[in-house]
Amino acid sequence: MSVQGSVADGFEPVREVFTDWVEASAGTGGGFAVWHDGRWVVDLVGGYADAARTRPWQPDTLVMPYSVTKAFAAVTVLVLVDRGLVDLDAPMTTYWPRLPGGATVRQVLSHTSGHVLLDEPQPEEALYDWDLLCDALERQQPAWQPGTAIGESALFYGHLLGQVVRAVDGRTLGTFLCEEVCVPHGLDFHVGVLEADLPRVADLTGYDAALRAYLEQREGLMVPALSNPPGALDPDVVNGDRWRRAEVPAVNGHGTARAVAGLHAALADGRILSEELLAEMTREQAVGADRVVGAEARWGLGVGIEPTDGWGMGGLGGSFGWWSRAGGYAVGFVTGTIGARPDDEDPGTRLENAARGVLGLAPV
């Protein structure tokens, strides 16, 4: 399995760690990218793009990084806030009159709205039918009074924000993201993959007994929150073209590591949002026990916050995007092997720590 791409002088240790990971992987591969001091210092891809391990991972291979998508979804609404078209503290009913609960846009963005579960069983079809899923959300009271608890809206975050975008702009969230954010900033990231781009999409692998056990042992509501409608944890669904073409903007964006890092670099550089709104996006809006994730969380507006270092978003399986204030770098890691865990064996952490070592920073 070959590794493609480049590293700047001094970053050779990152290539070594990446090559070791690719060679040890039994599933599909991935990519790792770092932007620092106005340039790409790491831009690597490797491994296979298909489960049969016949198609090499290319620089333009797209993969679904699960909740990393949420940062992209949040940015669509924040762009409209910057344009004066959306009020962060307006009730959601300003833009979606039939949504119950009384949450504000800010509460949705910061995962305190309570829109995390559906009691009524939904068909898989609801993943592909935007209006069908929104109808279900209109019949569902929040799991708690908005603003009184924290819980990542694992599967519905993009629909909640997408309804705001549709009400104000008329375009779908995926179309707005493409035309107003990704294309202008050269980000190869898509919510709703076009037919012409489907051959570039990598398979997700690693949905094994160990992954199921890991998810079931979590204390929060992550599994039920991702399981109705069913399909988001089913390889037959997420590796299907119908899912890839659909817009489920909480989880099913598809992109490259360079695009993920590039979003965070563009935000930090002030190329997407105003300085004032970026500061609002990246300050702590909600801190405490996340009832869905099952761990302590610090949420900004669409991103997690690490007070001493930065902000970004991770996804099931190990993909992540991040801006490090301490290091002044943006990083993106995407993987097709969903078996990756956030523990000592996590390849993304090893890769980032290799880059941090070059930059003279302590490990994360």
Image (cartoon, rainbow, N blue to C red):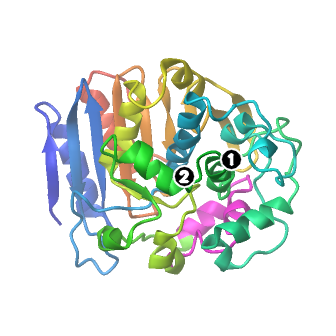
Along the line of sight, which residue is nearer the eye, 241 or 257? 241
Element marked by disc 2: helix
Q: Is residue 126 left or right of residue 100?
A: left
Q: Are marks 1 and 2 in contact (CB under 8 Å)?
A: yes
Q: Mark 1 packing: few (<14 Cα in 10 Å), some, or many (20+)?
A: many
Q: Is residue 315 visible from the viewing direction of this image?
A: no
- The residue that mark 2 highlights is 67
Residue stretch in magenta: 210-235
Along the line of sight, which residue is nearer the eye, 45 or 173? 173
Q: How far is the residue under mark 1 from the one under mark 2? A: 10 Å
- The residue that mark 1 highlights is 152
Q: Quadrant of residue 62?
A: bottom left
Q: Is residue 224 above or below residue 320?
A: below
Along the line of sight, which residue is nearer the eye, 205 or 174? 174
Residue at 73% x, 52% y is 220
Q: Is residue 52 left or right of residue 301?
A: left
Pinpoint residue 189: horizontal percent, then vertical percent.
38, 53
Give the quarter of the figure containing the N terminus: bottom left
Residue 296 shown in magenta: no
Amino acid carrying label 1: it is Glu
Q: Is residue 115 visible from the viewing direction of this image?
A: yes
